[in-house]
């Protein structure tokens, strides 16, 4: 998937499967984006999987998404596990492009719905997900290690 023009902000945006050379940039974005970031080895475990994608623009990694499909009684449930865009590259459509591409990958792998968890306080992410067709279905108290609640958001059907 390639997006050009003002959406990318830094020229051409390309989304592709992540490779080992992307890991340090992905971890840097993770550390800048979340109070409880995933460690390097967590991302390393998803290398080679179809749902680990990076968006590149301006010669570097601008964002990433990690997702997978879990079979459940004959239907697949997609799970967006982690998604982030570098703080300097937000509000340029990169997160929307990553999410759309991830949903396409999940659907191709048999998912009929997609879920994710988001911090209740993360209004920007909640807005992105709502604009992409996700609806909050429940609140999970104290989901995060710091005690913050999560909202489970679902897009059903894809």
Image: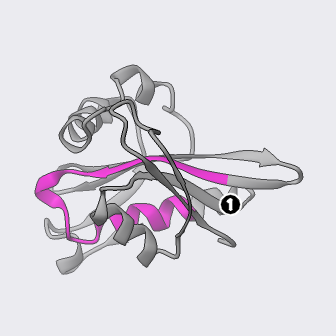
Which residue is at a point 15% across and 53% down the rendered structure image?
A: 87
Which residue is at a point 44% across and 25% down the rendered structure image?
A: 42
Q: Relative to 152, is 91 above or below?
A: below
User: How busy is the neighbourhood of tag 1: few (under 14 within 10 Å), some, or many (20 plus)?
Assistant: few
| Residue 52 lies within the magenta run | no
65 vs 126, nearest the viewer: 126
The image quarter containing residue 7 is bottom left
Q: For this view, does 42 lie left or right of residue 31?
A: right
The image quarter containing residue 125 is bottom left
Which residue is at a point 27% across and 38% down the rendered structure image?
A: 30
Residue 6 image offset from top left, x and y in percent? 17, 79
Q: Is residue 53 visible?
A: no
Q: Relative to 24, is 97 above or below?
A: below
Q: For this view, does 111 lie left or right of residue 39?
A: right
Q: Is residue 94 visible?
A: yes
Q: What kind of element bears circle 1? A: helix
| Residue 95 lies within the magenta run | yes
Which residue corresponds to mark 1? Answer: 108
115 vs 108, nearest the viewer: 115
Q: Relative to 142, is 89 above or below?
A: below
Q: Can you name the residue that lies furthest to the right here?
A: 74
Residue 96 image offset from top left, x and y in percent? 37, 69
Residue 106 image offset from top left, x and y in percent? 63, 57
Quadrant of the rendering where the C terminus is positioned:
bottom right
Q: Can you name the residue that lies furthest to the left here?
A: 88
Quadrant of the rendering where the N terminus is positioned:
bottom left
Q: Which residues are magenta?
A: 78-103
67 vs 62, nearest the viewer: 67
């Amino acid at each position: 998937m390639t997006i050009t023009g003002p959406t990318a902000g830094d020229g051409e945006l390309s989304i592709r499967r992540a490779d080992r050379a992307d890991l340090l940039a992905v971890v840097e974005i993770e550390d800048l984006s979340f109070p409880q970031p995933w460690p390097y080895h967590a991302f390393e475990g998803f290398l080679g999987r179809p749902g680990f994608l990076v968006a590149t623009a301006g010669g570097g990694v601008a964002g990433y998404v990690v997702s997978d499909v879990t079979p459940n009684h004959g239907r697949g449930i997609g799970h967006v596990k982690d998604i982030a865009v570098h703080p300097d590259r937000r509000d340029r459509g990169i997160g929307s492009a990553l999410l759309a591409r991830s949903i396409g990958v999940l659907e191709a792998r048999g998912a009929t719905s997609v879920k994710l968890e988001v911090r209740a306080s993360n209004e920007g992410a909640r807005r992105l997900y709502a604009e992409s067709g996700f609806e909050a279905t429940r609140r999970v108290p104290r989901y995060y290690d710091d005690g913050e609640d999560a909202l489970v958001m679902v897009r059903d059907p894809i």
